[in-house]
Image (cartoon, helix red, strand yellow):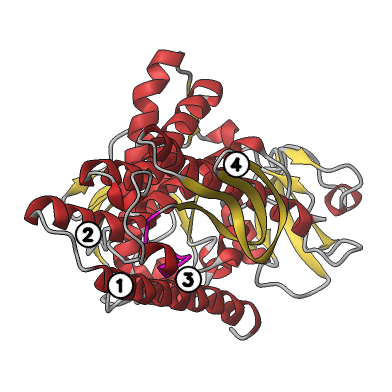
């Protein structure tokens, strides 16, 4: 069922993005009286699942869910319709239109993707506001795993900034690690035992960090707050062993525990069926053994510490009009963040190309339950990603067509048609290789790593 929910979210999100992207080409083409022969969601080699013709345009749904397309008359595209291109240009064809009209048609898809992201972020901000744990509000500091220790951080450190940047009160704790990674920080400024200390990040650390894989990276640093039993599940192993709400866990198998995240980290190392817990109840110390695994072999204690009880969570509400600039700023922040991620692909130290993912990686971003806020947030992110990738100056992508059109506008000369055809084929081969490489990475990481 989890896989089905993830798949449905992925298909719905991609369908929205593809249809609106292609609509971005379709609308200006129609406005400039350019004939659109096909408008398809998904690709339709050999046959389509559904099609209907209205006017000059055939609308349909293909069977291959790798995107979608509009086929515009007189345009060198993935259809490679050389027979049509061999004939004299007709007034309704793309190639017969002025360069500025062709440019608008080509950037239409990317423009719509950007607008979609802005609209989604505006509505999410208006409906949900913002809720985050400010990095400045970590009064107990952080809890570190072994990789964070290797980086030079210690449990109870408070991260103040990196290199020449100091974090402000508006920086969420969840943004700290991505900023360190994407900017390839060399030093981290921390408050340690009341003193500001500069931590020098070991050379090559970020490459090693990324090579751990997503599961290993999931902890790294976590906010520190007391390991108090605030919420205890009915009939949990803790309750059966006599532990109560309000007990503060101080040791696990004689290993001192101060913070909830430490307990989670320590639990991951234990394989035994039972563990010994020691808690502080008022002035009394109580110890007992409890079963660690549930009936379905999940590792579970059956309680939570209430983070909001110990750490102040920033909660902001926005009016509709106040949400508009926030929507623009979130779109820009997402775009610049993705641009930094993209640059890591070519970084010789980090070797980001090893972490390129295909549809499996995209699907893994969606939760296993239907959450509309998460769905629309991811759709906005994917819309920006789609806009960025499409505007890259690669033949067969919108950006390739834009480059050739700009060349024509500047030089007043059209590129040779044969050259455009060869460029289109080369671009398609490049894209096919990238798709195979990215999805091959998914298969490798799933079954062989």
Of the pair 3 and 12, the residue shown nearer to us? 12
| Residue corresponding to mark 3 | 146
Q: Residues within 10 Å of mark 2 (few under 14, many from 20)?
A: some
User: Which of the 4 image quadrants contains residue 344?
Assistant: bottom left
Residue 280, percent from left and from top:
69, 46
Secondary structure beneath dot 1 equals helix
User: Which of the 4 image quadrants contains residue 295?
Assistant: bottom right
Q: Are marks 4 and 1 in contact (CB under 8 Å)?
A: no
| Residue at mark 3 to residue at mark 4: CA–CA distance | 30 Å
Q: Residue at horizontal 35%, vertical 50%?
A: 90
- Indicate which disc, 4 or 2, sits on the residue closer to the N terminus: 4
Q: Residue at horizontal 39%, vertical 42%?
A: 34
Q: Are marks 2 and 1 in contact (CB under 8 Å)?
A: yes
| Residue at mark 4 to residue at mark 1: CA–CA distance | 39 Å
Residue 345, percent from left and from top:
34, 70
| Residue corresponding to mark 4 | 374
Residue 203, percent from left and from top:
26, 76
User: Is 96 left, or right, of 320 in this rendering?
Assistant: left
- Indicate which disc, 3 or 4, sits on the residue closer to the N terminus: 3
User: Which of the 4 image quadrants contains residue 321?
Assistant: top left
Assess whether residue 75 is covered by the magenta stretch. Answer: yes
Residue 447, percent from left and from top:
65, 82
Q: Which residues are magenta?
A: 74-82
């Amino acid at each position: 069922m989890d896989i089905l929910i993830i798949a449905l979210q992925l298909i719905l999100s991609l369908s929205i993005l593809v249809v609106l992207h292609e609509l971005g080409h379709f609308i200006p083409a129609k406005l400039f009286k350019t004939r659109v022969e096909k408008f398809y969601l998904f690709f339709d080699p050999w046959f389509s699942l559904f099609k209907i013709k209205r006017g000059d345009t055939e609308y349909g749904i293909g069977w291959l869910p790798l995107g979608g397309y509009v086929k515009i008359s007189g345009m060198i595209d993935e259809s490679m319709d050389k027979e049509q291109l061999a004939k004299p240009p007709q007034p309704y064809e793309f190639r017969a239109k002025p360069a500025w009209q062709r440019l608008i048609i080509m950037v239409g898809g990317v423009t719509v993707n950007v607008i979609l992201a802005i609209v989604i972020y505006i509505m999410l901000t208006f409906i949900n506001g913002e809720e985050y744990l400010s990095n400045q509000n970590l009064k107990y500091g952080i809890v570190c795993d072994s990789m964070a220790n290797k980086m030079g951080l210690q449990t109870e450190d408070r991260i103040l900034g990196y290199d020449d940047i100091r974090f402000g009160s508006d920086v969420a704790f969840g943004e700290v690690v991505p900023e360190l990674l994407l900017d390839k920080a060399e030093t981290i400024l921390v408050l340690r035992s009341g003193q500001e200390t500069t931590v020098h990040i070991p050379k090559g650390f970020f490459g090693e960090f990324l090579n751990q894989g997503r599961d290993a990276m999931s902890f790294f640093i976590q906010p520190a707050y007391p390991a108090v039993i605030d919420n205890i599940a009915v009939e949990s192993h803790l309750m059966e062993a006599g532990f109560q709400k309000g007990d503060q866990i101080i040791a696990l198998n004689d290993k001192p525990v101060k913070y909830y995240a430490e307990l989670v980290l320590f639990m991951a190392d234990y394989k035994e069926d039972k563990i010994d817990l020691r808690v502080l109840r008022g002035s009394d110390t109580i110890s007992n053994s409890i079963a660690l695994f549930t009936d379905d072999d999940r590792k579970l204690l059956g309680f939570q510490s209430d983070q909001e009880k110990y750490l102040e969570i920033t909660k902001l509400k926005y009016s509709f009009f106040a949400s508009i600039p926030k929507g623009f700023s979130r779109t820009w922040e997402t775009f610049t963040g993705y641009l930094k991620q993209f640059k890591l692909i070519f970084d010789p130290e980090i070797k980001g190309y090893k972490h390129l993912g295909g549809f499996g990686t995209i699907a893994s971003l969606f939760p296993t339950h239907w959450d509309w806020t998460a769905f629309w947030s991811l759709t906005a992110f994917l819309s920006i990603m789609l806009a960025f990738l499409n505007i890259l100056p690669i033949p067969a992508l919108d950006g390739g067509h834009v480059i050739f059109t700009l060349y024509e506008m500047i030089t007043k000369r059209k590129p040779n048609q044969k050259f455009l055809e060869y460029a289109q084929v080369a671009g398609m081969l490049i894209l096919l290789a990238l798709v195979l490489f990215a999805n091959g990475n998914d298969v490798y990481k799933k079954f062989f790593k």
